[in-house]
Image (cartoon, rainbow, N blue to C red):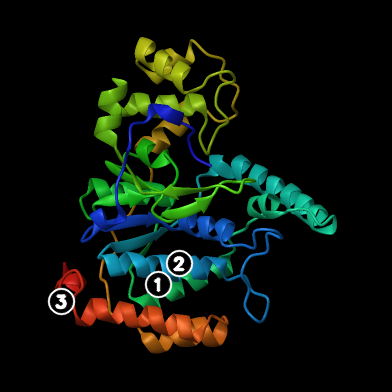
Amino acid sequence: MGIQFGSLIPSKEIELASFSGKKIAVDAYNNLYQYLTIIRDRMTGEPLRDRNGNVTSHLSGLFYRTSNWIEIGIKPIFVFDGPAPEFKKKTIEAREEAKKEATKKWEEALKKGKEAITYAQAAAKLTKEMVDDSKRLLDYMGIPWVQAPSEGEAQCAAMVKEKKVDFSASQDYDSLLFGSPNLIRNISITGKRKLPKKETYIEVKPELIELKKVLDTLGINHEQLITMGILIGTDYNEGVKGIGPKRALELVKNNKTLEKVLKKVQWNSDIPADEIFNFFLHAPSTGQYKLQWKEPSREKIMKFMVDEHSFSQERMENVLKKLQEVFTKGRQVTLGGWLNK
């Protein structure tokens, strides 16, 4: 869900092609959830499935969207979540309950012949099998992935701070609290999108958010931004009742530190605010990874996607042909340059 900062955060729309030649650490779970929720039947809410009934919406989005990035010249790195911090347990349990309730409403809507897409999206689940299949597909595509020791967004942020990559990519503003200098939103949903419950479409473009510009615009430092997030509500706490982005900003400006801010509000969470604060500042990350892009394996991709998961052979061939051109003709750079830079 992430922090709800609203309109306080300055950002700018930017064309996807502007990221050509850039390395982007993608929050994999966030990315896959988007595909699971978006790639569905607009009426029934049913996801894509293969001939054996296995959900394949995540593989469809991952393959086609990532292929598009590669054609443009983007060098993605997918970062997968490790074990969540213990104090996130309550949030995870609440989400599971919400998904169960959404599943019930989805089933009821289908029985009544009503549009069920909204409930279906809320009921979407990312299983271990889906994650494992996603990693297999990335391996076959020659795309590197990193296993984070904890939260994927924290790992992405660390990679940007260490200048191993140029940007982190996620829909959630939490990346800013973890200290990512450069965050991209909407990279996975770029293009025309239908507004919920309306026959209206909008053009979605990538949104670039620079942490320094955020802090300068708000007139605060990074620690105060974290305090703001905690007051509003994070993945680890519900936030303080009655406090939205504007009030949170006023509190941190007037009181400066988390300790002083807490004296002005009623903190009702079971989790100590300073524990959440310190996690955002010092979240676990690893430097034990190798960023190497390889030529995709046509044979393995076709076997996995067409033979195992019932994807269209013709469409797969068309995309693979375009990918091959990136490597053989150097659409953006030479083969050796794309692989090794």
Real-space CA distance between mark 3 and mark 2, rounded to the nearest whole angstrom: 24 Å
Q: Quadrant of residue 319?
A: bottom left
Q: What's under tag 3, amino acid-wise?
A: Gly
- Farthest residue to the front: give it: 199
The C terminus lies in which quarter of the figure? Answer: bottom left
Residue 328 position (above or below residue 341): below
Where disc 2 sits, the SS reads: helix
Q: Compare residues 57 and 203 and report the one nearer the observer.
A: 203
Q: What's under tag 2, amino acid-wise?
A: Leu
Cβ atoms under marks 3 and 2 closer than 8 Å: no
Could you tell me if residue 159 is visible in this image?
no
Horizontal arrangement in the rendering, residue 262 relative to residue 296 (left or right): right
Q: State how many labels appear.
A: 3
Which residue has dot 1 on it? Answer: 138
Cβ atoms under marks 3 and 1 closer than 8 Å: no
Which residue has dot 3 on it? Answer: 336
Where disc 1 sits, the SS reads: helix
Could you tell me if residue 219 is visible in this image?
yes
x 36%, y 49%: residue: 206
x 63%, y 53%: residue: 121
Where disc 3 sits, the SS reads: helix
